[in-house]
Image (spheres, helix red, strand yellow):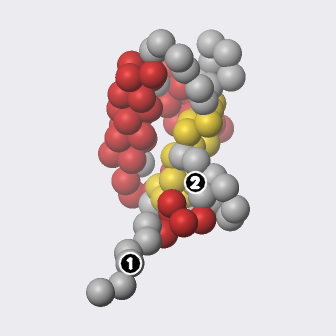
Amino acid sequence: MGQKVHPVGFRLGYSVTWGSLWFSGKDYAKLLHEDIKVRKAVKERFYQAGVSAVEIERPGNQIKVTIATGRPGIIIGRKGAEVDKLKVDL
């Protein structure tokens, strides 16, 4: 039997980066659960937009969410209205 290798774990650091880019010493579990909720909310809300990846960065007290999608017009909306609503919801 051959050895099975996870496709992301094998490439991590060379051609693929982590899904979340932050570090926390004490509140790690709380922030991890918050990341999972954010990813789930974005994927459910923009299911029809074809969201393929959601990357989360936490510089300081802020959160930066990068959404990779095939149909960005659905996420942006008219005059950026959907983006503003997403910021308020998150």
Instruction: Tell me the amino acid under the disc marked 1.
Output: Gln
Furthest-left residue in this view:
1
Residue 71: x percent and y percent?
55, 60
Q: Work out whether mark 2 precedes mark 1 in sequence or the reverse, and give the earlier one.
A: 1
- Note whether residue 78 is visible: no
Q: Seen in the image, is 16 located left or right of residue 87?
A: right
- Residues 61 and 90: in front is 61
Residue occupying image coordinates x 38% and y 23% = 29
Q: Would you place residue 16 above or below residue 56 in this image?
A: below
- Note whether residue 3 is visible: yes
The residue labelled by disc 2 is 68
Residue occupying image coordinates x 42% and y 40% = 39
Q: Nearer the viewer, mark 2 or mark 1?
A: 1
The residue labelled by disc 1 is 3
Question: Contact (CB < 8 A) between labels 2 and 1?
Answer: no
Q: Would you place residue 84 above or below residue 19 in this image?
A: above
Secondary structure at badge 1 equals: loop
